[in-house]
Each structure stands twice: as C-alpha cells, then as structure tokens.
C-alpha cells in the first residue's frame, strides 16, 4: 500500500471518529478550540491533518482550508497533537476557558529525508506494535504504532542500517542509502522466539537412551528395561520382545527395517514390524570383534564399526584392532573399508551422503569422508563424541563430553561454542540448534551463538533429541519420553 492510500484510509477513519459526539455533563463549563494548520516550507495550508486532544482523546481533521474546530470542550488544561504523514508532528499545551475560544496555529515542516515502514510478525503475518526502530549511525529511536508503522525523519544523506528489535523476538535489519529529499520504505519481519515446554508422552520415570520414528510414524525407544514402541498417537506404549538394554535404534530409510545394538557385544538386532519383535543378527563380519558404532546412509547402505576391546602388544607397539565394514545389501554381505589404531565411536551422514567418522583418541578425532570415498578434512574434539547434527547451511554440530562444537566446510575449521557436557544435538528447519545436557535442553537461534537459552529443566539427563514431521521436539530423558507442546519453529 502506498503512502497516499494510507493517508486516505487514515483520513476516513479519523473523519468517522470526529463525527462522534462527546457526552458533556449537564451544566458543564465549556469552551472552544479553533486553529489552522500551515506548511511552513511551502507557505500553504495543510488539509486532512490529524488532531487529537489529550487527555479526553477527542479527534478531528483539518478541512480544505487547513482549519479545525473543537466545540463544547470542558474547561481545563490539554495537550493538542497534530500529525500528517511526511510531516514532523507537533504538540501544544493549551488552556480552555469558559465561553471562550482558544486559538492555535500549527506550522509544520515537511520531512526532508525519511524512512517509513511497517514491522510484521514473520509467522502470523500480523503487525507488531511497540517495536523499537533504531539506526546505525544513530539518528533517532522510535516505536511502531498499533499497526506496526514507524517514521524516522530528518536524516542526513548517507547509508543507514535500520534495526527492528523487541523483547521476545529476534532482531532484524536492513540497509538503505538516503539522498537528500528521499523518503524510502523499509518494511521488516521479526521472528517471535517460541516458548518451548516439554510434556510427558510416555515411559514415565524410565531412562530413555535413543528414539526413532518408523516408516509408519510410531516411535521406538531404547531404555534401561529394553525396547518399547508406541501407537500412532504416541500416547500408548508397549514393551517389545527384546528386554536387553540397547544403546541406539536406527531406521533404514530404504528398507524401513530397524536396527539396534549394544557396544562391547555382538548384539545387533533387527525388526521388520516397526519395533514389535526383534531377531538377533548372526552374520556379523570378523567374529573376533565386537560392535563399537553403526550408521546407515541415505541410500540404505549399512556401515558397522567393530573393535577388539583388548589391547595387543607386539614388541614396543600397542595396537587395538578397529575396523569399519560396509554392506550394500542390507547386511547379507560385508566389505572391510577402513582400519585404525583408535576405536571408531560414531558414524553419521549428512544430506549429501558424506560420512563423518569419529575415533576416540583422547581427544576424539572426526574425519569427513566424501560420498566417493575421498578422505577430506579432520578435526580434534575434546572428549568422547556423542552425537552429530547438520543444518541447511553446511554447519556441522558435534556434542561430546568436552562441549558443543561447530564446524564449517566439511570440517575445514572448528569452534567450541559451549563447554558443558552434551549428549545429543539436532537442528530444525529454521537452523535452530538444540542440544541435550545433564539438566535441560540448550537452544541457540543463531548457529550456536546468541541469542540462546535453555529449557526443559527437571527431566534429568537429556539423552536424545529428535523432531517429528511437524517439528515438535521429542526428548528421551532420564524420566521418560517428552515432547514440546508447540513446534520448535513456533506457530
């Protein structure tokens, strides 16, 4: 909507309001206010200027000759305000006397250079009032009105950064270049930070280590007491036929089959009925080794880390045996890919099928392996690596006993952004980062940096975090399975 259209609508609204008669008490002592609104620069009248009398909130508009009139005003002191788009507003203190006319002359200056705009909530698409609008370099500070509109005037020529900020929202900004006499428009959206609260959805007071959604949409959980599965609403939970304490459950995105394993053993189980029943997988390669980690790529290929947890000595050399195997036929056959002195502890894949392979060497060692098998960058991370997540901008987030780390460009560089011990990490579609630790869930709305906060206290350790299809955040905790009452991206 252009400025002329906005002015016309405003004028119609004010004209309607001006037609309303203020109720005057019988025998009240009253007077009259009359005046004139004038353009001091052009020496012309200003019609349709908006005048409001405070504290009685009586309003009117100047007529075609610039004149205005308030009748039957109770005697007393008032503030008379006048404004019109693209003019600098003014106010005057006045006294109304009984049976007298108080005359007021307003001489307004047109805005020489200005920025106008409207602030809209990014999700609801509604105007946001009381947003603070500032500029860099500093010129003025204003608040948006009830319709989210603002005006900054008397700007010297130059480049300005316009910043919109309000408590509970993420700041937004834009940059404009003002030439003398310009009136530019800068509309902005601001994002309201969701208030996230967890509610229990199952397995109360049972430690839950891993969660996975199945191909039909129910949840499967590994716990202290074995594996449980939910109904489609996630409110009714049943125990499967596997009562062993398993560490992680993973879904194959191609076959839909579920896998669960326990490290330091050869216990690898599979389920083809969405977690209800499980069978022991007996065709693991290298019978001398035990499971250390597992990952499944987007194309369904299975990568299995095996290790000999004993220490072997040959002469002066100490060497454990650690290997990575690949199956391209859902575990029917295996090919050895890599071996190392350090134990493999985590295998994760990004959306481009790059593999991130972690080895524990105190500190841990994380390597990026391209989809064609080419070995890329590697980085050291303090502590045992627990989880890895990826966002849409190519950032990699790694949780470990030594903190939360962020990397760029397939591990070309790494930065520690928190020193707490973290167990799990996940990103939503807005690239917000969520990481579980010993007493709650850490959240960053800016790639791990500020603004950031924590929530979900009182649930004990947050062992695992996942998102459902609607981006509700689901947590496996020391005290059961919890889900946020609203989507993590907001409503």
Image (spheres, grey):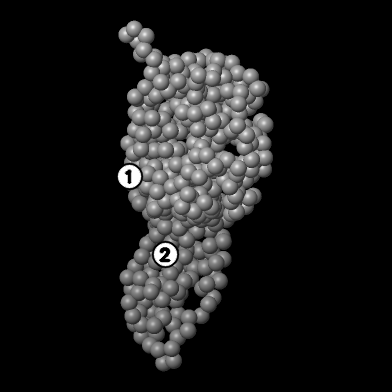
> In the structure shown, which secondary structural element does the residue marked by tag 2 occupy?
strand
Residue at the spot of label 1: 138
Is residue 224 in sight in this rendering? yes
Quarter of image, res 129: bottom left
From the viewer's side, name the closer residue of 453 and 280: 280
Is residue 191 in sight in this rendering? no
From the viewer's side, name the closer residue of 77 and 119: 119
Please state the total of marks drawn on the protein image.
Answer: 2
Q: Residues within 10 Å of mark 2 (few under 14, many from 20)?
A: many
From the viewer's side, name the closer residue of 134 and 423: 423
Does residue 327 sit above or below 56 in this rendering?
above
From the viewer's perspective, is 53 left or right of 93? right
* Dot 2 or dot 1, earlier in sequence: 2
Outermost top residue = 315
Q: Residue at x 47, y 65 (%)?
A: 50
Residue at the spot of label 2: 82
Which label lies toward us, 2 or 1? 1
Please give the label number shown on residue 27.
Answer: none
Q: Are marks 2 and 1 in contact (CB under 8 Å)?
A: no
Q: Residue at x 45, y 80 (%)?
A: 71
Q: Residue at x 51, y 37 (%)?
A: 246
Q: Position of residue 160 (x, y in %)?
A: 39, 40
Outermost bottom residue = 27
> In the structure shown, which secondary structural element does the residue marked by tag 1 occupy?
loop
Does residue 64 sit above or below 391 in this rendering?
below
Q: Position of residue 52 (x, y in %)?
A: 43, 69
- Separation (CA) of disc 2 from disc 1: 26 Å
Q: Position of residue 402 (x, y in %)?
A: 34, 33
Q: Residue at x 37, y 62 (%)?
A: 90
Q: Position of residue 372 (x, y in %)?
A: 57, 16
């Amino acid at each position: 909507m252009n400025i002329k259209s906005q002015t016309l609508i405003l004028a119609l609204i004010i004209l309607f309001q001006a037609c309303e008669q203020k109720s005057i008490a019988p025998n009240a002592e009253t007077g009259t206010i009359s005046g004139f609104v004038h353009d001091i620069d052009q020496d012309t009248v200003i019609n349709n200027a908006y005048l409001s009398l405070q504290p009685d909130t009586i309003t009117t508009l100047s007529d075609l000759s610039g004149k205005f009139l308030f009748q039957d005003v109770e005697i007393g002191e008032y503030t008379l305000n006048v404004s019109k788009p693209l003019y600098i507003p003014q106010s005057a203190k006045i006294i109304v006397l009984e049976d007298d006319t108080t005359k007021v002359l307003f001489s307004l200056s047109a805005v020489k250079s200005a920025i106008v705009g409207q602030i809209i909530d990014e999700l609801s698409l509604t105007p946001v009032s009381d947003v603070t609008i500032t500029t860099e370099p500093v010129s003025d500070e204003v608040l948006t009105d009830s319709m989210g509109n603002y005006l900054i005037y008397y700007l010297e020529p130059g480049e300005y950064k316009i910043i919109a900020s309000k408590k509970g929202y993420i700041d937004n900004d834009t940059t404009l270049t003002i030439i003398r006499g310009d009136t530019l428009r800068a509309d902005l959206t601001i994002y309201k930070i969701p208030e996230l609260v967890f509610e229990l959805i199952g397995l109360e007071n049972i430690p839950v280590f891993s969660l996975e959604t199945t191909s039909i949409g129910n949840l499967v959980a590994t716990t202290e007491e074995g594996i449980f599965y939910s109904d489609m609403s996630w409110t009714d939970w049943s125990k499967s036929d596997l009562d062993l304490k398993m560490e992680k459950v993973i879904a194959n995105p191609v076959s839909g089959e579920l896998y669960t394993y326990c490290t330091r053993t050869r216990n690898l189980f599979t389920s083809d009925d969405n977690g209800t029943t499980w069978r022991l997988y007996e065709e693991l390669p290298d019978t001398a080794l035990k499971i250390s980690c597992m990952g499944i790529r987007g194309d369904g290929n299975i990568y299995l880390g095996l290790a000999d947890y004993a220490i072997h000595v040959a002469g002066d050399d100490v060497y454990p045996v650690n290997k990575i195997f690949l199956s391209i036929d859902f575990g029917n056959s295996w090919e050895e890919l890599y071996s190392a002195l350090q134990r493999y502890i985590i295998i994760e894949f990004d959306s481009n099928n790059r593999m991130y392979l972690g080895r524990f060497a105190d500190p841990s060692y994380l390597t990026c392996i391209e989809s064609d098998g080419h070995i890329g960058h590697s980085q050291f991370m303090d502590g045992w690596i627990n989880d890895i997540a990826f966002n849409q901008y190519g950032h990699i987030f790694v949780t470990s006993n030594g903190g939360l780390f962020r990397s760029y460009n397939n591990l070309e560089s790494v930065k520690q952004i928190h020193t707490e011990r973290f167990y799990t990490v996940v990103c939503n579609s807005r690239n917000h980062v969520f990481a579980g630790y010993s007493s709650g869930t850490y959240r960053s709305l800016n790639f791990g940096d500020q603004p950031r906060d924590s929530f979900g206290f009182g649930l004990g350790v947050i062992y695992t975090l996942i998102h459902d299809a609607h981006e509700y955040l689901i947590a496996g905790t020391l005290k059961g399975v919890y889900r946020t009452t609203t989507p993590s991206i907001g409503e």
